[in-house]
């Protein structure tokens, strides 16, 4: 492993905090995801019957596999875009399962591109995967140039409850019939009650999110933009086994970072510790936040 590669104690302190909450969050707290996933899967897992619920990384990889299944690619060498790719863990997983795929990832965070490229080279996937720095709402890729696009736990960062700018760009990038898959937390039916509204606001602030998507508004927007075959699956019970890892990973992270880390526990890093602990207070079954997998196809007529 090259010395510069992100490890359990990455050199993120060297990444200067940006001039807004989002850049500061990812500059300071982003590398702490190494404590969650050695392969840098920056998302929750998908549990299937028969899996070991203690094997977190296998559940995180299963989420990658479930997203790929729903992309329903029809050729051996599809062109696929990860909209909000983090360090590219999902792309590397797809490269293994679909070696002919031409894979692209885009992220707003410069060090994720650098470190993602090193990880791609380490896994001999560099030839198949291109990572780029940019905004998934305005990517600059040519229109109709992708067979499939997906966003795992990144759509929440797009503006508004409909995530319209992200969906408009996805529609522009997809060829007719091309598919989109989104896995993320959304506000479902029901209301935030009493203290839940304040907890939800704090949760969004911790993760530097304006607001989570609202699942009804999101799917209505998909239909308005000319997507069809819209399929919505609430995954709360599938993700719960990996969510249950949060307190243990948090405790271990705090103990090791208090003892070993030379990096200061900044506000952004504390926020990243606090946010997952707030989740249960606003999530299904006590609140309207839940984890959804949404898939759709760009209409062939639109
Ligand atoms: C929680 S991480 C998930 C990363 C990755 N999808 C995964 O599951 O490992 C959220 C990602 O969304 C990216 N992101 C958020 N807003 C973005 C935007 N406007 N354009 C591009 N990437 C964005 C962040 O840079 C980060 O890489």
Image (tube, grey):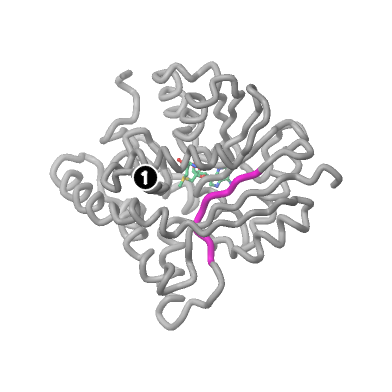
Tell me how many marks there are: 1
Instruction: Give the residue displayed 36% in from the left and 33% down from the top.
Output: 39
Which picture quadrant has residue 74?
A: top right
Q: Give the structural element (helix, strand or loop) at label 1.
A: helix
Q: Is residue 16 visible?
A: no
Q: Is residue 229 above or below residue 126?
A: below
Q: Residue furthest left?
A: 259
The span picked out in magenta is 180-187
| Residue at left offset 67%, top offset 59% | 219
Q: Does the stretch in magenta take in 153?
A: no
Q: What is the residue that sits farthest to the bottom in this orientation?
A: 194
One can see residue 259 in this view: yes
Q: Which residue is at 79% across, 46% downward? A: 299
Q: Is residue 38 left or right of residue 159?
A: left
Q: In which quarter of the image is residue 276?
A: bottom left
On the rendered structure, is 281 left or right of 177?
A: left
**Dividing the image into 4 quarters, which one contains the N terminus?**
top left
Whole-percent x, y for residue 99 in the image: 54, 20
Rendering coords of residue 124 (x, y %) = 44, 16
Could you say where residue 51 lies in the image, as x and y percent from the top left?
A: 33, 43
Crowding at label 1, few (<14), some or many (≥20) Cα neighbours within 10 Å?
many
Q: Does the residue labelled 1 lie within 8 Å of ligand 1?
A: no
Tell me the quarter of the picture where residue 100 sits: top right
Q: Mark 1 points at which residue?
A: 28
The foreground one among 173 and 237 is: 237
| Direction from residue 268 to residue 161 in the image, left or right | right
Q: Which secondary structure type mostly characterizes the magenta part of the structure?
A: strand
Location of residue 44 in the rendering, given as x and y in whole percent from the top left corner? 40, 49
The residue most toward the front is 50
Q: Residue at x 22, y 52 (%)?
A: 248
Indicate whether 120 appears above or below 133: above
Relative to the observer, which residue lies in front, 114 or 287? 287
């Amino acid at each position: 492993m090259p010395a510069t590669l992100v490890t359990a104690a990455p050199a993120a302190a060297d990444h200067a905090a940006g001039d807004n909450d989002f850049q500061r969050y990812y500059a300071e707290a982003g590398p702490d995801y190494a404590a969650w996933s050695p392969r840098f899967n920056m998302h929750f897992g998908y549990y299937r019957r028969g899996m070991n619920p203690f094997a977190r990384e296998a559940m995180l990889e299963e989420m990658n596999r479930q997203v790929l299944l729903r992309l329903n690619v029809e050729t051996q060498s599809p062109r696929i875009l990860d909209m909000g790719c983090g360090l590219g863990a999902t792309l590397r997983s797809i490269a293994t399962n679909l070696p002919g795929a031409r894979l692209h990832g885009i992220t707003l965070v410069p060090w994720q591109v650098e470190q993602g490229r090193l990880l791609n080279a380490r896994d001999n996937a560099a030839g198949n995967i291109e990572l780029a720095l940019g905004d998934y709402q305005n990517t600059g890729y040519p229109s109709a140039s992708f067979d499939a696009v997906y966003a795992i736990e990144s759509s929440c960062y797009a503006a508004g409850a409909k995530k319209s700018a992200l969906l408009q760009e996805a529609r522009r990038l997809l060829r007719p019939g091309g598919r989109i898959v989104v896995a993320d937390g959304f506000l479902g039916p029901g209301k935030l009650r009493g203290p839940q509204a304040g907890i939800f606001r704090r949760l969004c602030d911790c993760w530097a999110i304006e607001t989570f998507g609202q699942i009804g508004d999101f799917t209505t927007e998909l239909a308005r933009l000319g997507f069809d075959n819209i399929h919505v699956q609430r995954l709360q019970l599938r993700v719960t086994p990996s969510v249950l890892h949060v307190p243990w990973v948090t405790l271990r992270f705090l103990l090791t970072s208090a003892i070993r880390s030379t990096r200061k526990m900044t506000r952004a890093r504390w926020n990243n510790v606090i946010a997952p602990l707030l989740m249960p207070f606003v999530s299904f079954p006590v609140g309207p936040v839940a984890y959804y997998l949404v898939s759709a196809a760009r209409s062939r007529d639109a």
